[in-house]
Image (cartoon, helix red, strand yellow):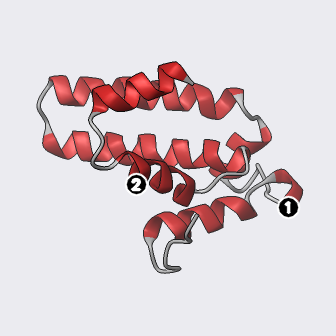
Amino acid sequence: MSKLPSDHVLAQIADVLATRLPQNGGDPDTSYAARLLAKAPDAFLKKIGEEACELVMAAKDNTPDRIVAETADLWFHCLVALTHYGLRPEDVLAELAKRQGLSGLDEKAQRIQT
């Protein structure tokens, strides 16, 4: 896994989220992310579901500004999940890079075989 540049917004968010983990002193009384991580995984999984539904509704309504906003909300909560499980955005980007140039149908068939 190659590390994102430190000025990349995903890396910056991931770095901040790591400081919000309970074992790193994250305070649920002062930080929304720390609250989600303290109540993990149910709290952030619920939010991921909610944000995914809101994104679907924004797309259904064809409202570009809401699509962007809801995607940002969904990505944020997915980053919280990655943090909880000891993962980083670089892990997801590496997976996407492996799939680049591979037909979606071929990629799915490979997953089913393994």
- In the rendered image, the vertical position of residue 70 relative to residue 27, given as above or below: above
Q: Residues within 10 Å of mark 2 (few under 14, many from 20)?
A: few
Residue 43 appears left or right of 56? right
Q: How many numbered dots are placed on residues in this image?
A: 2
Q: Residue furthest top?
A: 112
- In the rendered image, the vertical position of residue 114 relative to residue 16, given as above or below: above
Asked which quadrant contains residue 2, the reply is bottom right
Residue at which label 1 appears: 25
Residue drawn at the location 53% of the way across and 42% of the way down: 78
Asked which quadrant contains residue 16, the reply is bottom right
Residue at which label 2 appears: 97
Q: Secondary structure at mark 2?
A: helix
Residue drawn at the location 54% of the way across and 31% of the way down: 47
Tell me the mark number nearer the camera, choosing from 2 and 1: 2
Mark 2 to mark 1 CA distance (whole Å): 34 Å
Residue 11 appears left or right of 52? right
| Quadrant of the rendering where the N terminus is positioned | bottom right
- In the rendered image, the vertical position of residue 34 relative to residue 41, given as above or below: below
Camera-nearest residue between 61 and 28: 61
The kind of residue tagged 2 is: Ala
Q: Residues within 10 Å of mark 1 (few under 14, many from 20)?
A: few
Residue 106 appears left or right of 6? left
